[in-house]
Amino acid sequence: MMGRALHISDASEITDETPLRLDVAAALAYPGGGMTASGLRTEKARGRLAVERVAGRDWTTLGAIARMRELCRVNANPPDSGYDLSEAERQGRVTSGLAHPRRRQAVPHRML
């Protein structure tokens, strides 16, 4: 029957591998809002979210969203100076001036 949706009365019925429509998956994975089916499609296009297309509809799982979130995780920036580094870290750090000394530019020879 068209237009008839399956209603899950108990959230414990949903596992990490239960196929979910993107709008439902977004609502379950991000209960505070902010993520939509469109956002999940964007992550699919970027290659970070596994999506199945069945009968012209996109499906994903909470497990796939968890893997996507790992790929999207932003690492903290390393400190710009050596001030916050341990002694061992400072010893392995080379300043850009020492790592890449300036090379003399070739001076063109004048033709005599």
Image (cartoon, rainbow, N blue to C red):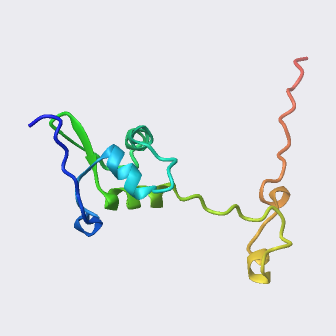
Image side of residue 104 versus residue 50, left or right: right
Where in the figure is residue 3, as x and y percent of width and height? 18, 35
Residue 42 figure quarter: top left
Quarter of the picture containing the C terminus is top right
User: Relative to 83, does residue 76 appear above or below in the rendering?
Assistant: above
| Left or right of 86 on screen, residue 53 | left
Foreground of the two, 13 or 82: 13
> Compared to 1, does 68 lie above or below?
below
Q: Name the residue: 22% across, 37% down.
A: 57
In the image, taking residue 6 as reference, residue 109 lies left or right, namely right
Image quarter hosting the N terminus: top left
In the rendered image, the residue lying farthest to the left is: 1
Q: Residue 35 placed where, x, y %?
A: 47, 47
Residue displayed at 22% across by 66% down: 13
Towards the viewer: 16 or 90: 16
Q: Position of residue 48 (x, y in %)?
A: 40, 49
Residue at point 43%, 43% (across, down) = 36
Q: Could you say where residue 99 lies in the image, as x and y percent from the top left?
A: 78, 59
Left or right of 61, for residue 83: right
Q: Residue furthest front?
A: 9
User: Image point 59% across, 58% down: which residue?
Assistant: 74
In the displayed image of the protein, which residue is found farthest to the bottom?
A: 87
